[in-house]
Image: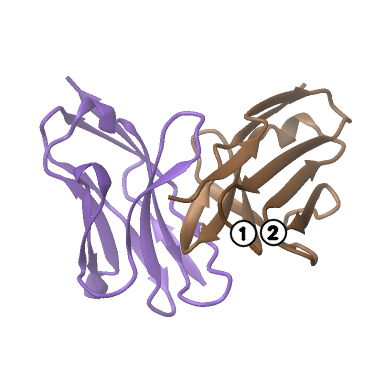
């Protein structure tokens, strides 16, 4: 079984400030890790993913995340927030084999203040 | 990237009627598609895995007779909410894999 915990259902930052969204996972075997963004009434867009190799993963729109196995974490960061970053962010995991359905965290709503 | 198209984007139906939601992979074939449900301000919960040419696999607690899934071709899966009730009102999202998972735009179902 696997699970995802996102600390903080709401995060508010000022435009230009650092964005940090936290994600911890639990899995019996090393999973694949993902961050998705969702805008209102829309589907999900993949920001970045970790499968293997380098633990610091760069994604779209200036986001990056670091896989820390010892901490079972995959926190999402962006050095400088933009107003357009305001959205809902979901961390997700999947198994490496089999049907690889995604298990999502509860989501974090990011607000960016001018 | 690959495109998954979901239709309709919004639907309002009366209690007791059935609603069909389509999920198409436009530029790739998908033997497996996934259906998720999202309640307001909550996360996505996997409902079922749709398998082309065979029965869908439902998650625990999901009524297979209420949420009928048909995956008749490699590019189309449908979810039919039968005898809909207000508590079925939700946002339904499908996804298909082309390497990574791609998501449809979602369907907002409102049952009145």
Q: Let me know if marks 1 and 2 both belong to one chain.
A: yes
Residue at position x 69%, y 59% from top? B74
User: Residue B31: percent from the left, percent from the top?
Assistant: 66, 64
Q: Is B4 left or right of A26, judged from the image as shown?
A: right
Quarter of the figure with the C terminus of chain B: top right
* Chain B on-screen colour: brown
Residue at mark 1: chain: B
Residue at position x 15%, y 27% from top? A15
Q: Is B18 left or right of A82, judged from the image as shown?
A: right
Closest to the observer, A112 or A39: A39
Instruction: Give the structural element (helix, strand or loop) at label 1.
Output: loop
Q: For the residue carrying disc 2, how many other residues have a C-alpha within 10 Å: few (<14), some (14-19), or many (20+)? A: some
> Does B58 appear above or below B108?
below
- Which residue is at the far bottom? A29
**Circle 2 is placed at which residue position?**
B74
* Chain A on-screen colour: purple
Residue at position x 10%, y 31% from top? A16
> Does B58 appear above or below B109?
below
State whether residue A59 appears in this view.
yes
**Circle 1 is placed at which residue position?**
B29
First in sequence, mark 1 or 2: give its number.
1
């Amino acid at each position: 079984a696997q699970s995802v915990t996102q600390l903080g259902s709401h995060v508010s930052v000022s435009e230009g400030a650092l964005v940090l969204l936290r994600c911890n996972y639990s899995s019996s075997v090393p999973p694949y890790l993902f961050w998705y963004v969702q805008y209102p009434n829309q589907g999900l867009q993949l920001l970045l993913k970790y499968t293997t190799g380098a633990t610091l993963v760069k994604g779209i729109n200036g986001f990056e995340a670091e896989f820390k196995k010892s901490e079972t974490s995959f926190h999402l960061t962006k050095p400088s927030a933009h107003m357009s970053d305001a959205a809902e962010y979901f961390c997700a995991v999947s198994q490496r084999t089999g049907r690889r359905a995604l298990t999502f965290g509860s989501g974090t709503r990011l607000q960016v203040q001018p | 990237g690959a495109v998954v198209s979901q239709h309709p984007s919004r639907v309002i139906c009366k209690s007791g009627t059935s609603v069909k939601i389509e999920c198409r992979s436009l530029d790739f074939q998908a033997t497996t598609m996934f259906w998720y449900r999202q309640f307001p301000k909550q996360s996505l919960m996997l409902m079922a895995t749709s398998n082309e040419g065979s029965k869908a696999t439902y998650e625990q607690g999901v009524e297979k007779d209420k949420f009928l899934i048909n995956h008749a071709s490699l590019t189309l899966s449908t979810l039919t909410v039968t005898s809909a009730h207000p508590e079925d009102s939700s946002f339904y999202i499908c996804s298909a894999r082309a390497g990574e998972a791609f998501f449809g735009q979602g369907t907002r179902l409102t049952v009145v």
